[in-house]
Amino acid sequence: MNDFAWLTAQPIAHRGYHDMNKTIWENTLSAFSRAIEAGFAIECDLHYAADGVPVVFHDDDLQRLCNLPGAVRDRSSQELGLLSVGGTKDRIPTLKKLLQLTDGKVPLVLELKGKIGEDAGFAETVLEVLEGYKGPVALMSFDHWLLKDLKALNPPYPVGLTADGFKPETFFAHDEAMQLGLDFISYFHGDLPNAFITAQRQRGIPVITWTVRDEAGVKRTFDNADQMTFEGFDPRESPTFIHGR
């Protein structure tokens, strides 16, 4: 198995190291700059803009973050790049801008969010943008079809399943995804411990959790997984993280 120790070496800032959208908003260059400064890995979300460019944004629509109607996928990356996030100076960045900012300083964990039947070529385009980037990168998705697309392209990056659930029928679907030869798992910490994650860790599959927001979540993570994706606090001030790992 490849050595992806860097994936679990430091806490991962969920959508960057934002301040819960008070002054520094999620998935913005400001949030990513703050994460780099603190030495945290960065998790963020990618959507496929109308012009076939991957952009960094979580929601399917613009309402919550930009106070505008309409879907992200219906606008070009240039149009999206003009939109203020949360009324701040930050605009919706492209993946290329994120890579230019990060420049290998901290690991990137990129979650692809697509729509089956409408985002053909998304996985391939993400890999094209990443070509030549020197820093550590991991790719993941909830969407099994996107994971299949990624693995079919034989990327030089670890590919992981984003998932949740605690029922056996859920585990069946997760096991099916793991048959693609995935390298890691990002799992909802509130559904731990469970038989699926225990079995995967016994196989040597690294597990990170999402999204940890309190000390109980930190403890649950390090009791049952290898690293956390966090928001709303500084892990360097967590007693569990400092003393209990």
Image: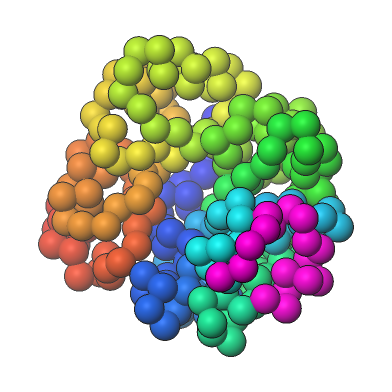
Vertical placement of residue 229 versus 205, above or below: below
Residue lying farthest to the right in this orientation? 51
Q: Which of 81/196 is in front?
A: 81
Percent from the top left, x then y, of residue 194? Answer: 27, 24
Percent from the top left, x then y, of residue 129? Answer: 79, 57
Q: Which of 50/95 is in front?
A: 50
Residue at image location 61% in from the left, 56% down from the top: 61
Q: Is residue 91 visible?
A: yes
Specify the quadrant of the image occupied by residue 147. Answer: top right
Is 153 on the left or on the right of 141, as rendered? right
Vertical placement of residue 201 versus 213, above or below: above
Percent from the top left, x then y, of residue 68? Answer: 61, 68
Asked which colour scheme the image uses, the reply is: rainbow
Residue lying farthest to the bottom in this orientation? 89
Percent from the top left, x then y, of residue 193? Answer: 24, 29
Which quarter of the rendered picture does the N terminus lie within? Answer: top right
**70 inside magenta stretch:** yes
Residue at image location 54% in from the left, 15% down from the top: 176
Is 30 on the left or on the right of 146, as rendered? left
Specify the quadrant of the image occupied by residue 204. Answer: top left
**127 inside magenta stretch:** no
Which region shows up in magenta? 67-83
Is 31 on the left or on the right of 29, as rendered? left
Residue at image location 62% in from the left, 27% down from the top: 144
